[in-house]
């Protein structure tokens, strides 16, 4: 890992945001494209390399967003750019037929997965992958009930939004899918049973039993769960919870689906988050990092599970297209060659230590949590009451941008800062970005 002596700061913002070119583009954008997306800093990205983004006014930022946990190998990695350019010059689209790139992509993805997952199928978005997992669970078991989690997020399509436990994707759209049973996920910072992780696990397992006893009609197909809750605020369950959940599924004879759309591709310090506790899910939804911005997703499965589908039952217009397939292969090459999961672990530990120091100095940084290079900073009005501070989080997004750090927010209460830089971040970049965060937070607290 390169750790060159730092001479000049990487991040550099020349004036107030938005800069003049950014402002003009944002004004034009708002006239033409519907304003439906979440809160972001007023920055118009022009180009990016590694972890550094440059906007149209020439300002430079360190990126803690990776888009939204997408560009794990770094922005515009030269090998990915070359692979995409080359593929696009030969063949951009075909439908439902093999190409050399698609065959190799499937082989390589299967080889990168834990052994029991021996089949994949390519789709386009994370929602499409979780949607497909929901359908496969029903098709395989002939049952229709799916267990999801409070705070879970699996996308905005019907099954995905229905199984998810965030109100946002559902509000205003009438009844969601029948047959979803939603149960609490362990949230250690806001545990209803105190600080003991074992008690929290027991509480959640008991609630699971109770909810199923009260709501199931006897038609349970399976569970869909994220290894950590992403959109709900990077909430990591205590060690031991997910294996218990898997064992519970086995005891009931139902399927265990892991949504690794955001937790995979080295993000937590291992290629797959499931590796931390040797989980053996029947189905896995994969997205984001698999394409690093080239729209691609996949379902990985045991062949006896996905084998329930007959010909024509799972397909996607541009899933597995030659450009995406070339991207899948190039990204796997880079992940392995540059040992990015290992770097995520090392840099994650370094940044976690540094951010915990910031927590000591801050009145509002209530919790710093995470694993590898996915960390959440939970902001509260008061560390004792833990009242969420969503307004402060929004202001922090702008202050950080003005200081040269791009962040985003998540959380059930909208009060969690995402710390999720590309996995290629160097020690200098990690150190400078943590300094920028500390400076921005303490500036706001003055
Ligand atoms: C865990 C998880 N699943 C599914 C999705 C949906 O992915 P997409 O936005 O690509 O449809 C997301 C997106 O943030 C996610 O974090």
Image (cartoon, helix red, strand yellow):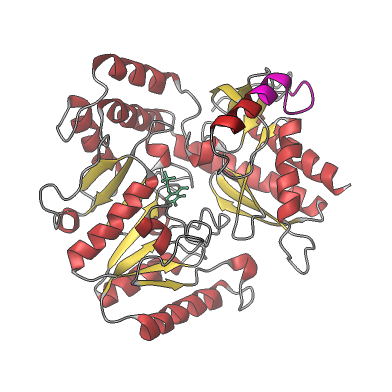
Residue visible at 78% across and 45% down in the picture: 441
Q: Nearer the viewer, residue 235 or 46?
A: 46
For residue 305, which quarter of the picture?
A: bottom left
Q: Which residue range is magenta in the image?
A: 13-24
Q: Position of residue 443 (x, y in %)?
A: 84, 42
Task: Report the residue at 24% width, 50% height from top.
Answer: 115
Q: Nearer the viewer, residue 84 or 203?
A: 84
Q: Is residue 345 above or below residue 174?
A: above
Q: State yes or no: residue 17 in magenta.
A: yes
The residue under the point 48% across, 45% down is 269
Judge left or right: residue 42 versus residue 169. Answer: right
Q: Quadrant of the N terminus?
A: top right
Q: Check the image and name the residue furthest to the right.
A: 446
Q: How many tags in the picture?
A: 0
Closest to the observer, 239 or 321: 321
Locate residue 306, reporting x and y percent. 18, 54
Residue 236 in the magenta stretch? The answer is: no
């Amino acid at each position: 890992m390169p750790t060159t002596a730092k001479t000049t700061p990487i991040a550099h913002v020349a004036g107030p945001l938005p800069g003049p070119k950014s402002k003009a583009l944002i004004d034009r954008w708002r006239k033409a494209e519907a304003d439906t997306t979440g809160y972001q800093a007023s920055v118009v990205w022009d180009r990016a390399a590694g972890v550094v983004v440059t906007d149209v006014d020439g300002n430079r930022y360190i990126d803690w967003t990776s888009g939204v946990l997408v560009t794990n190998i770094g922005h515009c990695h030269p090998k990915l750019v070359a692979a995409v350019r080359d593929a696009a010059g030969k063949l951009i689209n075909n439908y439902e037929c093999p190409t050399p790139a698609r065959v190799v992509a499937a082989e390589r993805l299967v080889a990168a997965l834990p052994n029991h997952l021996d089949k994949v199928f390519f789709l386009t978005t994370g929602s499409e992958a979780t949607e497909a997992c929901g359908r496969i669970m029903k098709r395989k078991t002939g049952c229709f009930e799916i267990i999801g989690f409070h705070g879970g997020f699996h996308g905005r399509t019907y099954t995905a939004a229905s199984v998810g436990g965030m109100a946002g994707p559902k509000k205003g759209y009438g009844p969601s899918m029948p047959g979803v049973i939603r149960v609490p996920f362990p949230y250690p910072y806001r545990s209803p049973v105190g600080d003991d992780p074992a008690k929290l696990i027991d509480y959640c397992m008991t609630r699971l039993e109770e909810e199923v006893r009260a709501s199931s009609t006897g038609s349970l197909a399976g569970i869909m769960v994220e290894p950590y809750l992403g959109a709900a605020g990077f909430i990591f369950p205590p060690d031991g919870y997910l294996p218990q959940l898997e064992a519970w599924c086995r005891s009931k004879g139902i399927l265990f689906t892991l949504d690794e759309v955001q937790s995979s591709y080295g993000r937590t310090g291992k290629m797959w988050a499931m590796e931390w506790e040797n989980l053996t899910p029947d189905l896995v939804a994969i997205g984001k990092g698999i394409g690093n911005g080239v729209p691609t997703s996949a379902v990985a499965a045991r062949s006896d599970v996905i084998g329930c589908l007959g010909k024509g039952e799972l397909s996607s217009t541009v899933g597995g297209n030659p450009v995406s397939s070339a991207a899948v292969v190039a990204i796997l090459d880079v992940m392995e060659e540059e040992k990015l999961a290992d770097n995520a672990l090392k840099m994650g530990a370094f940044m976690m230590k540094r951010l915990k120091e910031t927590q000591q100095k801050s009145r509002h940084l209530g919790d710093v949590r995470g694993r590898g290079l996915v960390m959440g900073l939970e902001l509260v009005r008061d560390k004792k009451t833990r009242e969420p501070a969503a307004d402060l989080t929004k202001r922090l997004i702008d202050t950080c941008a003005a200081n040269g750090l791009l962040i985003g927010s998540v959380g059930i209460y909208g009060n969690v800062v995402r710390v999720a830089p590309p996995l290629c971040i160097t020690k200098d970049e990690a150190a400078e970005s943590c300094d920028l965060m500390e400076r921005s937070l303490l500036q706001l607290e003055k």
